[in-house]
Image (tube, rainbow, N blue to C red):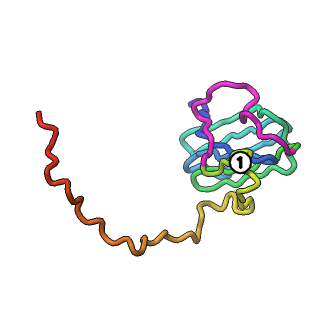
Amino acid sequence: MPAISPNTLWAQRKDRLFITIEVPNIKEDSAKIEFTENKLIFKGSDGAQEYELDLELYGELDSEKCSCKVLGRHIEILLMRKESGEHWPRLLKASGKNRWLKADWDKWVDEDEEDEKEFDYGDFGAGGMGGMGGMGGMGGMGGMGGMGGMGGMGGMGG
C-alpha cells in the first residue's frame, strides 16, 4: 500500500511555526521526523497505513532548535525560523492547493495582533487546555418566557 499524506495543520508567529500532523494510532517507534534548513520530512505508520510528508518550506529553519512530540492521535512539531520577521505568505515554497494542508485556526494569530496575544510555547504538545473548567451559567438571566404578542402569527399557508 503506498504512503499517503496525512492531514496537517499549521500556524505561525514571527519566529516559529506550529505543525500538527494528524495520524491516529501512530506507532511512536515508527515516527521518523527530520528537519533540514528548508525541509520537514516525516514518515510513520499506524500498523495498517504508511504516512509520509516531504515538505519544502517557504523559508529557512534553524533545524537545531526545532522539536517534536509524538502524542496519541497526532504529532506536534515546533519549527524555529532561521530569522524572525514578517509572516511567511504560505508554509510551502511551491504555491498551490494541497487538500491535506490546512491552517490551524486554534493557534493562528494575525501578524498585526501577535504582540497582543500570548501563547504558552512551553505547553505546546501537552494537549488541550487543562484546568479551564466550565463557563458556568449566566446568573440573573432567568427564563425568557414565551414570546408574547406572537399569538396571531399563523403559518405560511399553502
What residue appears at the point 33 percent right and 72 percent down from the top-left corner? 142
Outermost residue toward the left in this view: 158
Q: Is residue 128 above or below residue 55?
A: below
Tell which of 2 and 121 is nearer to you. Answer: 121
Q: Residue furthest front?
A: 149
Q: What span is in magenta? A: 84-105
Query: Where's residue 48, x and y in %?
Result: 54, 41
Q: Amino acid at mark 1?
A: Phe
Report which quarter residue 71 is drawn in.
Answer: bottom right
> Considering the image in quadrants, where does the C terminus appear?
top left
In the image shown, does 136 or 17 lie closer to the viewer? 136
| Whole-percent x, y for residue 19 in the image | 69, 45
Q: Which residue is pictured at 74% across the width and 38% down the height? A: 41
Q: Residue at x 15, y 54 (%)?
A: 151
| Residue projecting furthest to the bottom | 140
Count of numbered circles on the image:
1
Q: Nearer the viewer, residue 15 or 56?
A: 15
Q: Which residue is mark 1?
A: 18
In this rendering, position of residue 49 left or right of residue 149:
right
> In the image shown, does 16 or 34 lie closer to the viewer?
16
Residue 84 makes an appearance in the image: yes
Residue 93 belongs to the span the image colors magenta: yes
Q: Main secondary structure of the magenta part?
A: loop
Q: Quadrant of the N terminus?
A: top right
Task: Please provide percent x and percent y for residue 6.
Answer: 60, 38
Specify whether residue 22 is painted magenta.
Answer: no
Q: Is residue 27 visible?
A: no
